[in-house]
Image: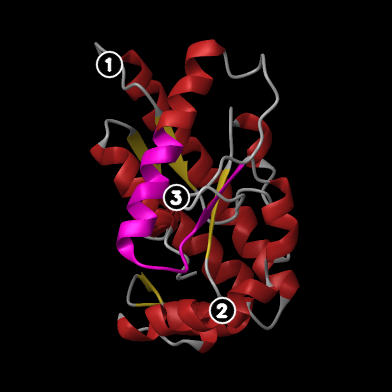
Amino acid sequence: MGAGKSTVAAALARRGAAVIDADQLSRRAVEDPVVLERIARELGPDHVRDGRLDRAATARTVFTDPAARRRLEAIVHPWVRAAAATAEAALLRAVPPPPMLVHDVPLLFEAGLDRQMDATVMVHAPLALRRARVEARGGDPDTVERRDAAQLPIEQKMARADYLIDNGADEHALEAQAAALWTALRMLASRGAASTPLSPFADARGESP
């Protein structure tokens, strides 16, 4: 949270990629009356008010109760996966299809979705900076730590990702890395994603991320 993965996805979209945003799909999922009914049944009726998800109450529950979080994910994640698959199929049927499909997913490794991707990218930034970004857009900065605690350790995700983007500097450095990422992924696609092992590329300063 606050690392800038959606900013990087937008930079790839400007270069021609089609982006499927799991966060947007998750927001649509909890507008589905069937999903809301299941959430009320699994987590309690106080989590749904006037036909809408009470996000504050739900966040308090799932970030303090791992079992409740797993129940919520078991409801929402299949809906999101099905919607993402439908969107992907439609994009691949387009004439011409987009040169790249990007899945913007906050829990990629935790959900095991990395095994379905040709390459994985992790956008990271220092905790203090992520907190400041969340606070600047009106969010609760303490949410960053709560969300981090509910996910794999950042170091593990960095080790598992094929490409790393360091979003700890300014927007110019981020844009340069996004441009390098686009070039690397296009080269990967041209030679066949499964044919060559991946390794992190050098960042804008010419150093390994």
Image coordinates for residue 134, horizontal then vertical, percent: 40, 79
Image coordinates for residue 53, horizontal then vertical, percent: 41, 72
Q: Which residue is mark 2?
A: 127
Residue type for callout 1: Ala
Which class describes the residues within 10 Å of circle 1: few (<14), some (14-19), or many (20+)?
A: few
Image mark for residue 204: 3
Residue type for callout 3: Ala
Q: Which residues are magenta?
A: 163-182
Q: Earlier in the sequence, mark 3 or mark 1?
A: 1
Q: Which residue is mark 1?
A: 94
Q: Is residue 4 visible?
A: yes
Q: Residue at x 42, y 39 (%)?
A: 180
Q: Is residue 152 visible?
A: no
> In whole angstroms, how far apart are the C-alphas of marks 1 and 2?
40 Å
Q: Residue at x 63, y 68 (%)?
A: 42
Q: Earlier in the sequence, mark 2 or mark 3?
A: 2
Q: Earlier in the sequence, mark 1 or mark 2?
A: 1
The residue closer to the viewer here, 153 or 77, is 153
Q: Residue at x 34, y 40 (%)?
A: 12
